Amino acid sequence: MYGAGHEPEARDSLANERTFLAWVRTSLALVAGAVAVSSPALEFSVAARLLLSLGLVSVAGVALGVGWHRWTRTETALRTNSDLPGFTGGIVVLAAIGLLMAGALVSTLVGH
């Protein structure tokens, strides 16, 4: 990647790096959410806590992978003056988070 093309503008490369770090923060927040959901203080069943926690950790891993993949593709595009990548990975992560939120809602409603 660093051997291809030319050195991009510093502000573009740094903006790409900040975006990658935002993906890392999102991943860490999802892991923190998994720890919180696994707490016995919540009124979820043990199975629901386990499923939601595992789901959040899984999505955190996917988010980290998407962020890394997007960073490398964007950096390569900046260096070779080609088109920037789309947002497909982000949509997948958003959909997975939405499904987990729906699962938490259903678990809450069924538990009461």
Image: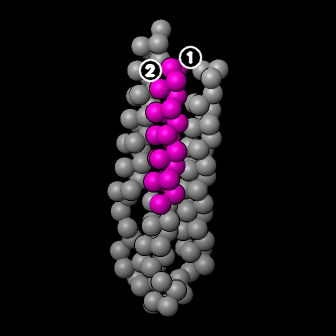
Residue type of the residue flagged with mark 2: Ser
Query: Which residue does the numbered mark 2 point to in the structure image?
Result: 107
What is the crowding at mark 1: few (fewer than 14 residues within 10 Å), some, or many (at least 20)?
A: some
Q: CA distance from mark 2 to mark 1?
A: 9 Å
Extreme residue in the front direction: 46
Which image quadrant for residue 102? top left
Label 1's element?
loop
The answer to whether residue 46 is magenta is yes
For the residues bearing labels 2 and 1, Cβ distance under 8 angstroms: no
Residue span colored magenta: 43-65
Q: Main secondary structure of the magenta part?
A: helix
Image point (47%, 47%), residue name: 58
Q: Can see residue 54?
A: yes
The label shown at residue 43 is: 1
Image point (37%, 42%), residue name: 95
Image point (56%, 49%), residue name: 26
Image point (37%, 67%), residue name: 85
